[in-house]
């Protein structure tokens, strides 16, 4: 068996990785119905300037696998890890992940490591990593379960996305995820300023297509205008198949179990249909049973399971 050689991604020229990025973009469509082309375009730009941290698996001059990571303040995030169809083996994926984890050791400021490697085909584990199971769910919109009537909970109103409320949304994310399992997976939820950065990145670099202000909603208190719910959505229309993705759904702890999340979900699904989407997708932590029940009640079904990994005391 031939084992490719791991090298720093910064040493790779764009022409060496182009074929791999084209294939990965297609696999995102095949596996998740997601449009990866925007992310692939950004990867191309950074590879062309030799400014993206990561690892490439090299056979001759051909890149058969790659990963990239970013280091922000005291945290490292592995954003992607993919091995081409032809070389997709458990051994090559382990080589890629092990080489990536080792490369991050060059950054002494990194005290925490996070990743959700959606493109790995084989089980991955690390003795020092905490693993969280995630569910990838999909809804065929023609089969959506629509209620006869929908009303906002008493004292609340649903509103369209408002760019002027981004700071309020970041503060809501902080309140909603305080002490929540998802804050163990993504520590940006734990500090309002970092939640603001996460929100900005979610809007600027969505995983599925482009951010859709039309399908994103806010819920506010009628009396004082205080934000108590937010849903962020993106829409992909690669290969003439539109898909609406729910990127974020958060509800203030003070109004939970009042139908706020359901109200925003129904609004987003109706807008997805209006925009011509055929499917809707989302990911959710498997142990978040309340959210899973909501999505299943709306008709979402699980397509696959993913894993998120956290090294909370990196390098440990």
Image (spheres, rainbow, N blue to C red):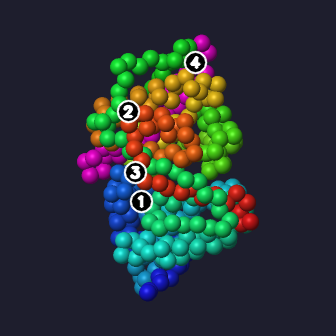
Counting from the top left corner in percent of width and height, residue 93 is at 49, 72
Image marks 2 and 4: residues in contact by CB distance under 8 Å = no
| Image quadrant where residue 149 sits | top left
Q: Nearer the viewer, mark 2 or mark 4?
A: 2
Residue under pointer 1: 40
Extreme residue in the left direction: 240
Gap in angstroms between the C-alphas marked 3 and 2? 18 Å
Residue under pointer 3: 303
Image marks 3 and 1: residues in contact by CB distance under 8 Å = no
Earlier-in-chain disc, 3 versus 2: 2
Left or right: 316 in relation to 51: right
Quadrant placement of the C terminus: bottom right
| Residue in the foreground of this view, choosing between 292 and 188 | 292
Secondary element under disc 2, as helix, strand or loop, is helix
Gap in angstroms between the C-alphas marked 1 and 2? 27 Å
Q: Nearer the viewer, mark 1 or mark 4?
A: 4
Image marks 1 and 4: residues in contact by CB distance under 8 Å = no
Secondary element under disc 4, as helix, strand or loop, is strand
Residue under pointer 4: 221
Counting from the top left corner in percent of width and height, residue 18 is at 37, 69
What is the number of the mark on residue 269? 2
Q: Nearer the viewer, mark 3 or mark 4?
A: 3
């Amino acid at each position: 068996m031939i084992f490719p050689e791991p090298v720093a991604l910064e040493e790779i020229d764009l022409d060496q990785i182009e074929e791999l990025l084209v294939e990965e973009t297609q696999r995102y469509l095949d596996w998740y119905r997601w449009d990866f082309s925007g992310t692939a375009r950004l990867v191309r730009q950074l590879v062309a300037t030799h400014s993206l941290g990561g690892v490439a698996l090299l056979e001759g001059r051909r890149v058969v696998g790659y990963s990239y990571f970013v280091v922000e303040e005291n945290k490292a995030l592995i954003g992607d890890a993919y091995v081409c169809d032809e070389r997709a083996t458990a051994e090559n994926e382990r080589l890629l992940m092990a080489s990536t984890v080792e490369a991050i050791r060059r950054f002494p400021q990194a005290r925490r490591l996070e990743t959700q490697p959606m493109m790995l085909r084989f089980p991955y584990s690390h003795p020092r990593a905490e693993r969280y199971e995630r569910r990838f769910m999909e809804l065929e919109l023609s089969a959506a379960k629509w209620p006869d009537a929908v009303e906002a909970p008493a004292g609340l109103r649903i509103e369209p996305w408002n760019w002027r409320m981004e700071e309020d949304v970041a503060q809501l994310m902080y309140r909603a995820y305080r002490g929540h399992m998802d804050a163990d997976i993504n520590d940006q939820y734990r500090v309002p300023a970092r939640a603001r950065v996460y929100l900005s990145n979610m809007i600027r670099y969505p995983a599925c297509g482009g951010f859709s202000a039309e399908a994103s909603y806010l819920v506010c208190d009628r009396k004082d205008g205080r934000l108590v719910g937010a849903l962020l959505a993106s829409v992909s229309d690669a290969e003439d198949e539109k898909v609406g993705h729910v990127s974020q759904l958060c509800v203030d702890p003070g109004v939970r179990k009042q139908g706020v999340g359901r109200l925003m979900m129904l609004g987003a699904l109706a807008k997805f249909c209006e925009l011509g989407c055929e499917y809707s997708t989302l990911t959710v932590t498997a142990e978040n049973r309340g959210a899973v029940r909501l999505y299943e009640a709306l008709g979402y079904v699980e397509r696959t399971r993913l894993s998120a990994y956290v090294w909370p005391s990196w390098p440990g």
